[in-house]
Image (cartoon, rainbow, N blue to C red):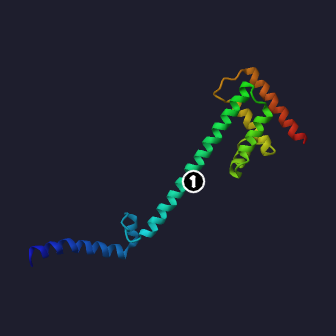
Amino acid sequence: MTLTARWVTIVLTPLALVSLLFAAFPSFATDIGLDFWNLSELERQIEECSQSCERYTRETKQADKRSALRRDITNQLIRGERDFASAVNFFYELNNEDDKLAFRTQLIYRADNLRASSALQVFSYAKYSPEKISPERLAELEKDCQAYLSELKQK
């Protein structure tokens, strides 16, 4: 046997044995990441992950936009540039855009309906805002919130 034939035999024999092992036990190849013959499944998984990533990115951008809008409305409310009812209406519209968001809002700010939950949310945002709020303004907003909730109950 020539030297080339020996080297071919030495290299090809282990490759053939490994190929037979993977063919006999495909889950073993999958477990160690060497299931190269199932590329269509891998491509499908990659596509699913890409779509999930795109959806996550889109949802994150929407949440960031809603958060920035809420901060702006809250700051306007604290500065007296917006009244409590209009801030509640704005928050209500944002919360009502998505059923999941509406559900979470009502879960966190427990009230009879989404509009009442939005009122509690507005007051909470104002109370815990990083923007400076005087105790007097906070007390005024608390009264506005209570009056708004009372008015909702009467309807």
| Percent of width and height locating residue 148 | 83, 35
- Is residue 65 left or right of 34 when viewed as pictured? right
Judged from the image, the secondary structure of the residue bearing numbered disc 1 is helix
Asked if residue 77 can be seen in this view, the reply is yes
Specify whether 17 is left or right of 89: left
Q: Residue at x 78, y 30 (%)?
A: 83
Figure quadrant of residue 144? top right
Q: Is residue 134 left or right of residue 14?
A: right
- Residue 35 lies, in percent from the top left, at 38, 68
The N terminus: image quadrant: bottom left
Q: Position of residue 80 (x, y in %)?
A: 75, 25
User: Foreground: 111 or 152?
Assistant: 152
Q: Residues within 10 Å of mark 1 (few under 14, many from 20)?
A: few
Q: Is residue 19 above or below residue 94?
A: below
Task: Write down the residue under mark 1.
Answer: 55
Q: Is residue 14 above or below residue 51?
A: below
Please state if 58 lies on the left or on the right of 92 as rendered.
left
Q: Nearer the viewer, residue 77 or 23?
A: 77
Give the farthest residue toward the right.
Answer: 154
Q: What is the quadrant of the C terminus in the image?
A: top right
Q: Is residue 119 visible in the rendered structure shown here?
A: no
Give the answer, above or below, for where 126 lies relative to 101: above
Q: What residue do we see at 87% from left, 36% from top?
A: 150
Q: Amino acid at mark 1?
A: Arg
